[in-house]
Image: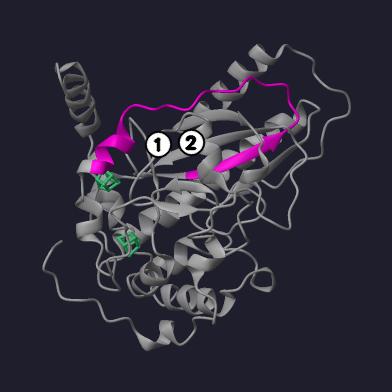
């Protein structure tokens, strides 16, 4: 571990913690599978940490640059309002619709697009999703801007790029939603940072976006962890993608770049049991006071070697060499 000074959280955030640990809400240590609980980023009346969320977001909005991009009408906008569903379905085979929606998404502000069937574990408790498919969208963040994390009031660049790309991801999913509605099928857009029914990370992993990293975010073979998600659920006939397992999980076993960099030491170096699954996990109670103070932090994303432009190709070659080494 690094020998950095221990992080001392600000009382303004620690005073807002409820009795229940965020890790308990998330199911840390629970061996039975269950759906995720509504949590931070959910509407205040539907979660346990609403007071903390308000304190964090109010604090972030003290930065004029951050406030500008978290407005309801930020520069570039959040995308069109939903159009009515057209009467009568435009009928095509699922393979054809799959190509059409992917081409549409990539031509309309998305950098990544994948499809998977909706599963109960992607849906937060207290919500329902009745559509059979989820189309996940990824939008890349500029690495040089993200690499200025952690943001501060003096240099909010990394917070602004996160907010800016949340807005692009919102536009991308809303445009795709409207395209599907115009074809006579149902579609619903999901955009961050505020959450509703859909837990996007497991859906994106099943859609082929990559593997879960030690820092709790996805590692993609092209963008590393320098991207944001949005999604569309729909009854349009589609074909599913497969998960993309390229060795990132195994790489995390040998790497500590994110856990060493994390100022409050929130990133576990060993996988944890969470709702019946052993996986990488970030300690919410440790992360969030720093996240609050550092305008959204995000330091673990650029510190991941997969996020550096040009580096994934090199790491993939290393992984292939290691796999071909006799006796390894
Ligand atoms: S966002 Fe910051 S505090 Fe939270 S896990 Fe990442 S580096 Fe640590
Ligand atoms: S920094 Fe290293 S350990 Fe952390 S997610 Fe990236 S590859 Fe995995």
Which residue is pictured at 69% across the width and 56% down the height?
125
Q: Nearer the viewer, residue 328 or 149?
A: 328
On the image, the x and y values in percent for residue 230 come to 55, 44
Task: Using residue 28 as the reference point, say whether residue 46 is left or right of it.
Answer: right
User: In this rendering, does residue 40 appear at all?
Assistant: no
Which residue is pictured at 48% across the width and 66% down the height?
23
On the image, the x and y values in percent for residue 5 come to 15, 75
Task: Using residue 3 as the reference point, say whether residue 145 is left or right of it.
Answer: right
Task: Using residue 248 as the reference point, say whether residue 281 is left or right of it.
Answer: right
On the image, the x and y values in percent for residue 221 come to 33, 30
Which residue is pictured at 55% across the width and 36% down the height?
136
| 115 shown above or below 321 | below
On the image, the x and y values in percent for residue 274 come to 49, 54
- Magenta residues span 229-253
Separation of marks 1 and 2 at Cα, in angstroms: 6 Å
Disc 1: which residue? 211
Task: Using residue 324 as the reference point, say whether residue 140 is left or right of it.
Answer: right
Q: List the single residue furthest toward the left.
A: 3
Q: Nearer the viewer, residue 116 or 101?
A: 116
Disc 2: which residue? 205
Residues tagged 1 and 2 counted as in contact (Cβ below 8 A): yes
Q: Which secondary structure lies at badge 2?
A: helix
User: In this rendering, does residue 8 appear at all?
Assistant: yes
């Amino acid at each position: 571990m690094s020998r950095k000074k221990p992080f001392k959280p600000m009382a303004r955030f620690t005073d807002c913690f409820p009795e229940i640990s965020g890790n308990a809400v998330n199911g840390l240590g629970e061996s039975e599978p269950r759906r995720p609980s509504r949590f931070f980023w959910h509407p205040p009346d539907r979660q346990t940490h609403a007071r903390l969320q308000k304190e964090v977001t109010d604090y972030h909005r003290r930065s004029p640059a951050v406030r500008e991009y978290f407005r309801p009408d930020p520069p570039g906008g959040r995308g069109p309002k939903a159009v009515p569903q057209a009467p009568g379905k435009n009928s095509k085979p699922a393979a054809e619709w799959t190509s059409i929606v992917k081409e549409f998404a990539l031509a309309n502000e998305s950098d990544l697009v994948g499809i998977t069937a909706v599963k109960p574990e992607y849906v937060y408790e207290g919500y329902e999703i009745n559509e059979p498919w989820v189309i996940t969208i990824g939008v890349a963040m500029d690495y040089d801007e993200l690499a200025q994390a952690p943001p501060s009031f003096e240099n909010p660049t990394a917070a602004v790029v996160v907010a800016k790309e949340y807005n692009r991801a919102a536009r991308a999913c809303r445009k795709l939603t409207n395209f599907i509605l115009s074809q006579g099928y149902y579609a619903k857009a999901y955009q961050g940072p505020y959450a509703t029914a859909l837990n996007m990370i497991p859906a994106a992993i099943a859609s082929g976006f990559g593997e879960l990293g030690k820092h709790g975010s996805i590692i993609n073979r092209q963008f590393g962890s320098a991207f944001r998600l949005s999604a569309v659920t729909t009854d349009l006939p589609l074909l599913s993608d497969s998960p993309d397992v390229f060795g990132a999980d195994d790489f995390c076993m040998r790497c500590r770049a994110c856990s060493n960099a994390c100022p409050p030491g929130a990133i576990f170096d060993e996988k944890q049991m969470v709702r019946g699954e052993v996986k990488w996990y970030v300690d919410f109670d440790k992360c969030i006071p720093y996240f609050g103070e550092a305008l959204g932090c995000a330091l673990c994303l650029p510190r991941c070697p997969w996020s550096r432009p040009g580096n994934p190709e090199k790491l993939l070659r290393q992984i292939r060499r290691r796999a071909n080494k006799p006796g390894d």
